Amino acid sequence: MHLGYIIPGCSFVFLYLKINAVRSPFIPTLHSNKHIHAPNVNSHKGKNHGAPEDEECMVGDLGNVITTEDGKTAVHIEDKALKLIGPHSVIGRSIVIHSGEDDCGRGGHELSLTTGNSGARVAAGVIGIAAA
């Protein structure tokens, strides 16, 4: 798994995520959920799980990606809520791919408002800063 780059002086994060040939019993899948796992990425108190474009969602809810039948996934993420510095920085946090489609809090399942009912974790990587 390779995670993208950061533009100095930029007020938000660009993550380019490429996962090649992930092999698991959950692949191939058409849609997978991705989000950042970490306590205190931002205050989740009083917020439900949602889609990145929702007015109210947990910081780190990054939506769905498409995985091809050969197990390859590529996605571009731009999110103005993610922070690079300060107590809620995403540096050192993990980004996780789940086996199922994220219902973005709208599925009516008991897990919809907390996890998007997106299934088991199948891939993860740590967000960091690398030399260009």
Image: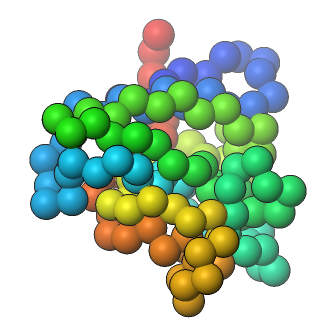
User: Where residue 123 sits in the image (x, y, percent)?
Assistant: 30, 52
User: Where residue 95 sits in the image (x, y, percent)?
Assistant: 46, 50
Name the residue: 21% across, 39% down: 69
Say if residue 41 shows up in the picture: no
Q: Residue furthest bottom?
A: 110
User: Where residue 7 sits in the image (x, y, percent)?
Assistant: 67, 17
User: Image check: 27 left or right of 94?
Assistant: left
User: Image check: 88 left or right of 28?
Assistant: right
Q: Is residue 96 above or below residue 8?
A: below
Q: How is the image coloured?
A: rainbow
Front-lying residue, 128 or 14? 14
Front-lying residue, 65 or 129? 65
Name the residue: 46% across, 43% down: 65
Task: Please state the total of marks drawn on the protein image.
Answer: 0
Q: Residue furthest top?
A: 132
Q: Is residue 10 above or below residue 42?
A: above
User: Where residue 92 sits in the image (x, y, percent)?
Assistant: 50, 47
Say if residue 34 shows up in the picture: yes
- Location of the N terminus (image quadrant): top left
Name the residue: 65% across, 78% down: 113
Name the residue: 69% across, 63% down: 50
Front-lying residue, 131 or 46? 46
Front-lying residue, 44 or 78? 78
